[in-house]
Image (tube, rainbow, N blue to C red):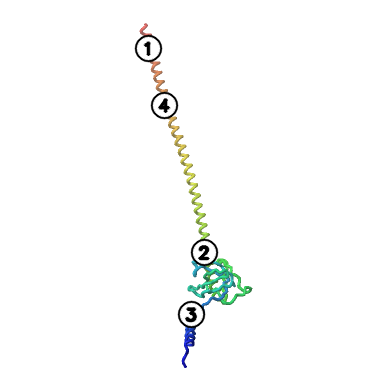
């Protein structure tokens, strides 16, 4: 039985359609779908697939999102929010099932590792385990920062004491220099006064010697005149 041209074209079209469906099946399987946040704290939606990118939005537990691409590498998925914002988030904190907000666990408070003992649950899902590891890391970093702050305060206090002592020593040095100049001036004044006194004493002695010599000369002349008159 021979096929007409119209039937031949029909079978060719059907073959092309099936071929296109087979070729593009991965894209059909990778279509966008709805997911929900299962992070106990807040899920950070960033502008790129990595912690180095800025945060666009923080989503609370149970928030619905549209997953554009499930896994683009590095454990991140491409999302679209209700507001139309597109970003990237860690895909292990996304679930296809909605979370019951009433039974959702409360955010875990950071314990003080130096005063409280950490209690480990017997069973923990991957999301809780990753969150607990992050909490432990943050707690250790916080304790380390506290210790560094205490040490910094000690160094600052010591530096302030050294600065205060240096200022006191400088003030004492300035006072000693002033006293030294004052003593030098007094010593110079005493030396000048002593030289003046010695000068006056010498002049007085010289004047007295001249006066005594003149008196003796006058008395000698008088006695000579008296003897000559006899």
User: Considering depth in this image, is 106 or 121 the residue closer to the camera?
Assistant: 106
> Residue visible at 36% across and 10% down?
224
Q: What element carries label 1?
A: helix
- Is the C terminus in the top left, top right, bottom left or bottom right quadrant? top left
Residue 199 has which mark? 4
- Of residues 183 and 121, the one drawn nearer to the viewer in this rendering: 121
How far apart are the alpha carbons under marks 4 and 3?
126 Å
Give how far apart the Cα atoms at labels 3 and 2 are.
54 Å
Q: Position of residue 22 (x, y in %)?
A: 48, 82
Query: Which residue does the numbered mark 2 point to in the structure image?
Result: 144
Q: Residue 74, how many percent across, how many down?
A: 48, 73
Q: Nearer the viewer, mark 1 or mark 4?
A: 4
Nearest to viewer (mark 3 / mark 2): 3
CA distance for labels 2 and 1: 115 Å
Mark 1 or mark 3, which is nearer the start of the sequence?
3
Residue 144 vertical placement versus 189 (above, below)? below
Residue at numbered disc 1 = 221
Please rate how many residues cluster around mark 2, counting C-alpha atoms within 10 Å: few if below 14, some from 14 to 19, many from 20.
Answer: few
Q: Tell me, for residue 11, which label it has, or none.
A: none
> Which residue has dot 3 on it?
24
**Which one is in front, 12 or 96?**
12
Q: Does residue 14 lie above or below 199 as drawn?
A: below
- Distance CA(mark 2)–CA(mark 4): 82 Å
Specify the quadrant of the image occupied by residue 62.
Answer: bottom right
């Amino acid at each position: 039985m021979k096929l007409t041209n119209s039937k031949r074209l029909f079978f060719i079209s059907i073959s092309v359609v099936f071929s296109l469906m087979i070729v593009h099946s991965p894209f059909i399987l990778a279509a966008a779908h709805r997911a929900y946040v299962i992070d106990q704290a807040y899920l950070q939606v960033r502008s790129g697939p990595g912690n180095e990118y800025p945060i666009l939005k923080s989503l609370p537990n149970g928030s619905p999102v549209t997953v554009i691409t499930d896994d683009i590498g590095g454990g991140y998925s491409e999302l679209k929010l209700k507001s139309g914002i597109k970003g990237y988030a860690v895909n292990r904190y996304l679930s296809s099932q909605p979370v019951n907000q009433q039974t959702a666990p409360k955010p875990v408070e950071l314990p003080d590792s130096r005063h409280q003992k950490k209690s480990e649950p017997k069973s923990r899902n991957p999301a809780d385990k990753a969150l607990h590891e992050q909490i432990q890391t943050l707690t250790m970093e916080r304790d380390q920062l506290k210790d560094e702050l205490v040490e910094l305060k000690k160094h600052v206090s010591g530096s302030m004491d050294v600065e205060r002592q240096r200022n006191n020593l400088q003030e004492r040095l300035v006072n000693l220099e002033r006293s030294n100049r004052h003593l030098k001036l007094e010593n110079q004044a005493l030396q000048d006064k002593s030289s003046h006194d010695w000068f006056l004493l010498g002049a007085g002695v010289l004047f007295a010697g001249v006066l005594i010599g003149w008196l003796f000369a006058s008395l000698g002349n008088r006695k000579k005149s008296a003897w000559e008159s006899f």
